[in-house]
Structure formats: C-alpha cells, structure tokens
Amino acid sequence: MLRKTFYFLLRAVRNMWQSPMLTSASIVTVTVALAVLAFFAVLVQNISDVTRHWSEEVQVVVYLASKPDAAERNADIQKLRADPAVVSVAYISPEQARNSFRQRLGADEDLIKGMPSDFLPASYELHLSEEMRSETGVKQLVERLRQQPRYRDLRYGQEWLERYGAIISLLRVGGFIMGGFLLFAALFIVANTIRLTLYARREELEVMTLVGATPWFVRAPFLLEGGLQGFVGGLFALLVTFGLYHLALRSQLATLFMASGVGQIHFLPAAYQVYLLLTGTFLGLFGSLVSLRRFVRISP
Amino acid sequence: MVKLFNLSKSYGRDLHALRDLTLSVPKGDFVYITGPSGAGKSTLLRLLFAAEVPTRGQILIGGQNLGRLGNRQIALMRRKIGVVFQDFKLINSRTIYENVAFPLEVQGKKRYEVSNKVYQVLKHVGLEHKLKRFPKELSGGEQQRIAIARALVIEPQLLIADEPTGNLDPEVTLEIMELFKSANARGTTVLLATHDRQMIQRFPRRIVSLEAGRLSADTES
C-alpha cells in the first residue's frame, strides 16, 4: 500500500516536472481564482464586523402610560429580562428623560423651561441579544410587548432596521453568488487545463490501459497531481491575499471604517485559511476526476 | 486458448467489419490472420484484447468470457496478453528500460524483479545496450523489437500482433519473426495479422483468411 502510494506520488511529481507549462497554468488558475475569493472574503468579513458593531445600537424603547411605582418597576424589569431576546433593561424615569432631552437641546434648553418635570413619559430601554437584532427578531419581540396595555408606545427604529437587514442580505447573497461563480469558473479552467495535460499524455494513457493497468491505477497519479496542484494553488492564493492585505487592504479598510468605531481590521481566521487550502485541493481533485472520466476508458 | 462463437462487429448500420466468425485456437498454436485491407483483421485483434466490444457473439480467452468482464477484470485479463502494433505504440517520453518495465510496474512487481526481467528480455531481443536511450533514437526495427520485448516481459499466454512487420524492411522482418517463433516455442499462443505472403511462405503455420469480414479459409500449411 505504502509502496503503491509512493509510486503514484513519484509519478505525479514526475509528470508535473515533465510538463512545467501546463502545471504552472493549473496552479496559476487556482491561485488567481482563490485569491479573488479570499480577498472578497476578507472584505465581506470586515464589513459584516462593522455592521455587527452598528447593530449593537439596535434597541427597543417601551414608553409607559404612567410612571410606575418601585414594585411595578421591579416586576416589569424582571419580566422583560425573562424574554430570551432581551439582554438588559434600563429604566428611564421622566426626570432622566427630561435631563437628557435638555442636554441634547444645548443652547436651546430654554424651550422646555417651565414644563412640568414629568412631561416626558417613563420608559424602559431594552438591549437585544445579537441574534435578535434583526427585523423579524425585533418585530416578534414588539408583538409580545404589545400584549401589555400599560406599554403605551414602542419604538425601535423600523427604517434603520430594514436597511440594516437589506445590507446584510445583499452582502450574503452577493458573496454567495460571486463566490459560486468564481469557484465554478476555477473548476472549469482547472478541469480544462488538466484535460490538456491528459491530452498531451494520451499515448501513455493508451499504453497503460493496454498493458493491463486497472482504472484506478491509471487515474491515481493524475488525481494526485490535480490535488497537489490545487493545494499549491490554494497556498499561493493565501500568500497573495496575505501580501495584498498587508500592503494595501488593511490601511484602506481602516481608513474607511474609522468613523464607525470598529477597532481592528482582521485577516481571514485560521479556519477559513484551512478551508481555502481544502477548496484548492478539492478543485484540483475534482477537475482531474471530471477530465479523467472522459479520457481514461479501459474498454469502450 | 481462444474461442470465438458467431462473432460479428458492425459500425453503424452498413459497415460490417466481421460477420458471424467462429474460430478456435488451441493453446500453443501459431496462427496467421490474413486477408486484404479492410477484411477485418485488425478489428478481430482489437476485439480479442477488449479494445472493441462485439456487436454479436462471444469471445472466450483462457476460458473467460470477455463479454462478462468488468473494467477491472478486463485489465487483469490483459496482463496475460502481449500486444504488438504496426506503429509500435512506445511512450516517447520514456527510456527503453522504462517502456519495457511499464507492464511490470502496472502489475506492481518489485523493483529488483522488474530490472531482472527487463534486462533478460532486452538481451533476448538484442538491445540490452540501449536501455537508456529513447524510442525516437532507435531505428524502426529496433523500436519494434522493444515493443515485442514489452509484450514478452510479462511472459504472456497469448501474443497478439497486428502487422508487426508492416513498416519494416525484409531483413528486419526475419529478425522479428524469429522472436515470435521463439516465444511460440516457449508455449505462448501467437496470433499474427499480416498480408505479407512471403513471410507466411517462409515461416509456414496455420492460416486463417478473412474476406469482407467472413472466414474464407482456415488451412494448416
């Protein structure tokens, strides 16, 4: 078994050595396709980091019909906290609301002079758990809260939420479509490049089958070759993306996102880097397999 | 060794390469397959090593029905058959040694066993001094001797040759025929397609004649 694997590996490496142009073409194809994919993934990932950061601002404000007494307030807070969508609850008394309103008015604070201290309603500010900071999550929560008649009004920045949801789904769908296209294009090109390699070696393949090579014996070195080329392509793609990230992307993105208050721009996490290598290997393997099915026939 | 029953091969509706051929070749026999171009000689040989599938009829080789074999079993069956072509079919990117060693490598034989056998068979065809050369550096006759060495290195039960001397001059033809004769003397069944009358007269053996895909004569000469 070990001897056979070694033999296949030797043949695969020798094959690549004997046709350096085709081998480089395959590797470059995988590298380019996966580098574009990885580059895009870095972008998407950082943009979604930013939007997640923004979404922390998503909150629901519950305005009360009347100012609650201490017992009512404690009961409300406990009940609200029990909701799985709610992470924390802050009570804002009419006086606190008035103060913060006054601060926001700044120089125009005279406008509310003479108004009673409780002219603004008391309210609870609810901070939501991350998975509930979506349009549907918030709406479900609001529906639940409407059951309670003492909660006079509920505010949750509908418009902002809708836009946020749209951006996130655009990114996701765009990412999937673009990634899918790139992978498909890469697969197509890799398969064709390997087909060229096979075409160049068709006499060898023919002789192999004539002298009694089993289908797998013929295919194994080519599969290994495809897999190796894909892996090397993936590795190069990772290096290229990492280089680009360090040279340009990191500072550009940092400038772009500075205003949003996101502290750091990240490269792909380790797991994604491994996925990239695996994707490269898979591309090479699958590309070979597709071509081999056409080329290697033991009998008609 | 080889038994054919009502074997037919057609390409499309109108082209009948072989029609209703029944033939038996005992073990150790030496048989010429002759006939004019297009008589079906090459088709018959290609059917024997399963490079083609018959339209009708059965082929038995060493008791195995080819029609019932899967890809893997066909591969294993080919390991008992040596095939020699008019155009040699050597791998030009590999050395003579590698070309001859190829069938043994495919069978997963150990390295020392491979080198031993390759050297012996190259010596037998008289080209042991050229094992590091490439096919294109050799003459046509030498290339055919290499192709025969590749066929013989597996010690085949059946040796199939399609016009093996078709491209070679008469002197070289004699050398090549000696190789087939000696393989046959060691017990290998030989099926040799040719239309070279002189050669048949010089080395008389059983002759199976084909004409327009049919068996026209089967004579012991």
Image (spheres, rainbow, N blue to C red):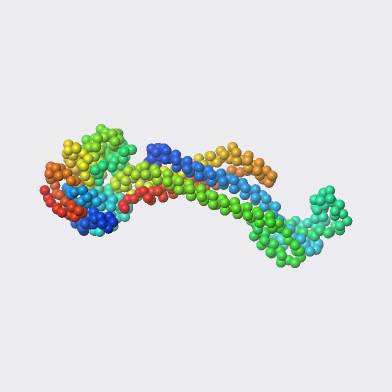
Q: Nearer the viewer, residue B198 or B101?
A: B198
On the image, which quarter does residue A268 sit in? Answer: top right
Q: Quadrant of residue B3?
A: bottom left
Q: Residue furthest left?
A: B221
Answer whether residue B90 is visible to the viewer in this image. Answer: yes
Residue A107: image location, x then y, percent: 84, 48
Residue at image x 23%, y 49%? Answer: B42
Query: What residue appears at the point 67 percent right and 56 percent down from the top-left corner?
Result: A161
> How many numbered dots are placed on residues in this image?
0
Lateral position of residue B62 relative to residue A196, left or right: left
The residue positioned 75% from the left and 62% from the top of the image is: A153
Q: Residue furthest right?
A: A114
Please state if A176 lies on the left or on the right of A60 as rendered. left
Point out residue A70 in the picture as x, y percentages from the top left corner.
80, 61
Q: Residue at x 17, y 38 (%)?
A: B170
Viewer-side residue, B154 vs A163: A163
